[in-house]
Amino acid sequence: MVTGSARLKVLQPVNRRRLLRRGIALTGATALFLACGGKPESTTAPPAGAVQATSAPSGAAATPTPKRGGRLLEAWYTSTNNLNPTTNYTEGIILSGVKVYDRLISQRLGKDTAKEYVLEAAQSVEMPDSTTIIFKLKPNLKYQDRPPVSGRTVTAEDIVNDELYRRDNPAVGNYFQNVSMQSIEAPDAQTVVYKLKAPNAYVFSSSQLAALSQCIIPRELLNSLDTAWPIGSGPYQLVEYSLNTRYLYRRFDGYREAGRGLPYIDEREVRILVDPASQEAAFRSEQLHIWRVPVPTLADALKKEMGNKITLHEFLSTAIVTLSINATRPPWNDVRVREAIYRILDRQKYVDLLEGGRGKVPPGLLPEPLAEYQLDPKQTEKYFRQDVRAAKQLLDAAGFPYDKEFDMSALTTPRNNQGMEIFQQQASQIGIKVRVQPMPFAEWIQKVSTGNWDLWYAGHPAYDSPQPILRLQHTKTYTQHVYNGLKDPAIDAMIDKSEQTLDRNERIKLVKDIQIALLEKYTPFIITHSYNDIWAQWNFVRNYEPMRATQAMYLTEMWLDK
């Protein structure tokens, strides 16, 4: 302790007990996750030339007088092996990244990511032109009083150094630094000026300036982030930890909102619990206060058995679950073979069997909650029309090698593993032989990043914009997933144009056109469905705000009524 100093068969929907016995290990770039944090304060009217800032939704109703104090007990279900919030999802999304470190801004689903955001450490944001962004820092930002930082003031120079670090080193999401950012400078201690290479329609999204990796880190730590004790200017400071086991955070009295009494909760303790049965037992015994429920039927059982002791939050996630076919190698580079896959792909089966019917099949290639970008189902019906006979004719015409068995891999999770088996059975209708291969994240990501694969099935993070999803359809994905899409220059150009189109209505039209263009060529990167996210909380937890997408949130206004 460091202190202050057996495969599933697709015969029925996912069974709760079978799933709990298998366990869940969602890790790495395609792990499904939901960022939790705090409700930022309402912002005042921006100065002339500023882009529009908005406050977060109010969340659950609170009593007029929140109580200070107490310890919130949380858990997370992916393992972690270092303290670096820029390279480690768990560290960035649930541990120090949303407790110890601050961020300039955060984002919420449904906002115009070209100009809307929520202020965090930033006092204001101005865009004098379409490629210049000027942040002014709040005046009361200081780091926690621990060597080698020792309580000094946060400066704009820190943010410049952070961005250059993320640009030049592996990071969880450094698309902005390597693709969008032309330069960054600090003309004074309170001002950060970004120059962009081109106008950016998604600049304030959770894949760019509001990304999980955008922590404000003191420059003294940048050369040793994997092992350095986290020191930030956020609402909490780390006081104890046992790596990959338990982390204890305590209120930082120098936090920028301490004058408002925030954060209300004194301490937040997080335990890493990979096994769902252990998570359930901990929640039922009040050793966890908030829990992401892995199976819809389990949520129903909890509500029935625990009644008004708990509240369930259920909503359609912006996370996507995808089938990916490697169109850079035969036989998948033949459009007739890919069309045959569409003819036998029953996407509703994934909702019924994996989610117990609680989810949606989007009409196009984006998750349903990105509502304004959705296609009319009548536009896409022809692409997903099921016809086994036509599929077989297409394969025959393409000279498909029926004697070959194709590998299908996935990061091993109950949803991914059974999803592969659903596809295996659907493909067998037309004589395609598929061997499913669940594997650990490190092995799986190595496989898919080298192109040495035929098919994979996996869940992805939740997003607040189409940008990262469409970028996975592009020749240049800027991720480890470099063999997903068609590598079609014309569609690449459409995606590039959409990313630079600042007018919201025009961008929506472009994104819809891109989806149709991809479907016309039977893109090998297909969303099978969107699923319902379910979070459970004990009712003494007040002002909890669950989110659909992956924004950093601090939950400083959450409090314990006990």
Image: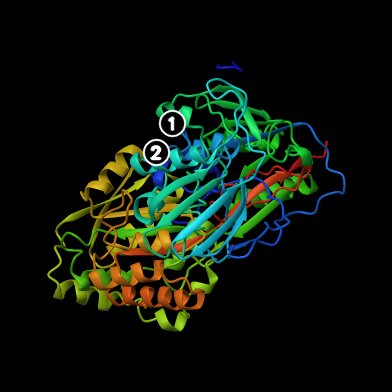
Which comes sooner in the sequence, label 1 or label 2? Answer: 2
Please provide percent x and percent y for residue 113: 52, 63
Residue bearing mark 1: 222
Q: Which residue position holds label 2?
A: 165
Tell me if 263 is positioned left or right of 520 in this view: right
Give the number of callouts: 2
Q: Are marks 1 and 2 in contact (CB under 8 Å)?
A: yes
The answer to whether residue 163 is visible is yes
Residue 244, above or below 200: above
Q: Residue furthest right?
A: 64
Q: Quadrant of residue 242?
A: top right
Disc 1 secondary structure class = helix
Q: Amino acid at mark 2?
A: Tyr
Q: Is residue 202 above or below residue 561?
A: below
**Callout 2: SS:** helix
Q: Nearer the viewer, residue 299 or 335?
A: 335
Quarter of the image where one finds residue 397: bottom left
Q: Nearer the viewer, residue 482 or 539?
A: 482
| Quarter of the picture holding the C terminus | top right
What residue do we see at 46% from left, 78% from top? 506
Q: Position of residue 220 (x, y in %)?
A: 47, 27
Q: Residues within 10 Å of mark 2 (few under 14, many from 20)?
A: some
Residue 175 in the image, given as x and y percentages of width and height: 38, 52
Mark 1 to mark 2: distance in Å? 7 Å
Q: Position of residue 511 (x, y in %)?
A: 42, 73
Residue farthest toward the front in the current orientation of the protein: 187
What's the amino acid at mark 1? Answer: Leu
Q: Residue at x 26, y 44 (%)?
A: 447
